Image (cartoon, helix red, strand yellow):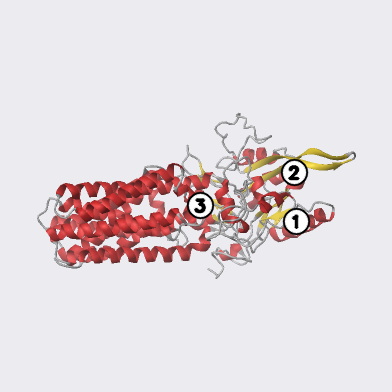
Amino acid sequence: MTSHSLYGPLADVSGDAGYPEEHPARVGFFTDTSVCIGCKACEVACKEWNGLPDTQDVLALTGMSYDNTRELGSNSWRHVAFVEQDVIREIADGDGSATRWLMASDVCKHCTHAACLDVCPTGALVRTEFGTVIVQPDVCNGCAYCVSACPFGVIDRREDDGRAWKCTMCYDRLAGGLEPACAKACPTDSIQFGPLDELRDTAQARVEHLHATGHPEARLYGEDPDDGIGGAGAFFLLLDAPEVYGLPPDPVVTTRDLPRMWRWAGVAAGVLAAGVAVAFTGRK
Amino acid sequence: MTEQPQVPPAEFQSYYGRPILKVSRWQEPHLPLYLFLGELSGAMAMVGAAAHASGRAPLARTARLAAAASAYAGSAVLAAELGRPERFLHMLRVAKPTSPMSVGTWILTAHSGLASAAAASEVTGRLRWLGAVAGAATAVTGPAVAAYPAVLLANTAVPAWHEAYRELPLLFVGGAMTAAGAAGLAASAFSSDRADFDAARKLAVIGAAVESVAGYSLETRPQLSAEPYRTGSGGKTLTMARYLTLSGGVVALAARRSRLAALMSAALLTGGGLAAKFGVLRAGKASAADPKYVVASQRPDSNGAAMSQAAVNGAAGSAAAVHGADAPT
């Protein structure tokens, strides 16, 4: 354990987890939502490759634009969000109203400081040699602590199976030298897979290009190692505030505050001991 | 945080109003019941040790049996809530300081073992010295068993739990004292020993005071995440808990001789402690279900109470708001 193991930037996340020095480079996703066309090939490829069951009401229409997947969950490890906004645009004859259509493929963030992994009491959630976070289905006992700990609402328990499930970044494919199914299937390269360092450079160049070409609203989300989760292994280029896409604006790994929480619990334990002592002193 | 923000209540942006977080899978009655049984066991173990030390043998016996029984009942409820109950022992594969559930499991395991040893020695009359040592050791594990569940809840992304990490432990140890005080009142109502009765009464009154003050500060925190403790199903349950606990405390204070009053106080306090646990679970779920609590806790300019209009309206045109200084806690 290093001094940063609960919070803050961490240069070598697999090394911190105990892998020997020669472990592979940390890999991740850069999801550039500015080129997403909402085809959901990522959702389909993920379901196919990982053999994910149907969501219960798979044919129900939500009325949320083209999004009938609703959210990430135990059976949906990629989720394409569709946001329709009325905006005023400059057009040839003056200003006119138009619809801006935002699409974004969400996924597990594979946090540098992953709350799900921190709180897992069985050791079912582990860091892989690639720096990703996976659940071991043969270990998970379905306590559901990770479900409440994840600041992105990603991981969930499959109620018919009793265990927690989430994106593995196609651990089996990575081990075989392949890229994850969603990135492979993405027709516009909205989902890019690769070594995290390289992706961060690519993303920086992309956001600068967008700023220079009249898109000041473009911003990176989750790429900063100084943020509340130590930087995400899967980060995004967004065209609006994170909460518009259903993402938390500035998530912090809950474990950052763990020492403080134990101190207050210690104070309370002292109050309890004092209360019992007072009740039992005095005349007998 | 004395000044109210000078902006009208803001509209929070969200994705079709959908939750950002997953609502906890922890269920009623399992989790609230466990919280109640755990704190009861913790406090009863301490009562047992205190009663033993001050020479109240009958009370020590009752308390030790109750401490062991509630520890086992609590563990059973916990196991029943797992998605894979048959894998309960997987909890003991590892010891993880970063997981309050792992730490809590080990605390509970030690506590149940010691409490059972103390109780077994009481029942069989064998190895009394060992029972006494185990009983004394539960005076150390007891407070830990009663207080750790507050860290279990607070160490989540759930705004109403995470941001209440100061108040929750006090609420739970207050509940531990009222639960043990109530059990003591009920047990000693029919005993001729005035000293036992007085000790239980004192514990009940102190507990009711701590629980009420902690509950009040939980609801009146400046953060927006205090709201689910006042409103909705969680708010109603906690208000009921407050009335039950306060009236139980007042009746305990007044119950100098009356058995009926003692029993009534025990019922009120037990009901109040149980209701408080249900209310805490409900408030936590409500705060995870509404994205505004997450946004409010993470937007540095939201001032913990309401977002500024600039942050709401300007978000589409400005990239500046994305990575501000962190705000929670």
Indicate the chain on which mark 3 is placed: B
Q: Within 10 Å of the Cα at label 2, are there few (<14), some (14-19), or many (20+) other Cα atoms?
A: many
Residue B189 lies left or right of residue B95; in this view the side is left
Residue B108 makes an appearance in the image = no
Label 1 amino acid? Ala
Quadrant where the C terminus of chain A sits is bottom left
Q: Is the same chain shared between marks 1 and 2?
A: yes
How far apart, in angstroms, are the residues tagged by discs 1 and 3?
35 Å
How far apart, in angstroms, are the residues tagged by discs 3 and 2?
35 Å
Residue A102 makes an appearance in the image = yes
- Residue pushed farthest bottom? A3
**In the image, what residue occupies the spot 42% across and 66% down?**
A263
Label 3 belongs to which residue? B225
Residue A81 at what x, y percent from top left? Answer: 67, 41
Label 2 belongs to which residue? A36
Residue A244 at what x, y percent from top left? Answer: 66, 46
Label 1 belongs to which residue? A203
Residue B193 lies left or right of residue A180; in this view the side is left
Residue B160 lies left or right of residue A199; in this view the side is left
* Front position in the image: A32 or B273: B273
Residue A270 at what x, y percent from top left? Answer: 34, 66
Label 2 amino acid? Cys
Residue A123 at what x, y percent from top left? Answer: 48, 55
Tell me the quarter of the picture where residue B146 sits: bottom left
- Residue pushed farthest right? A92
How far apart, in angstroms, are the residues tagged by discs 1 and 2?
15 Å
Indicate the chain on which mark 2 is placed: A
Q: Is the same chain shared between marks 3 and 2?
A: no
**In the image, what residue occupies the spot 38% across and 47% down?**
B239
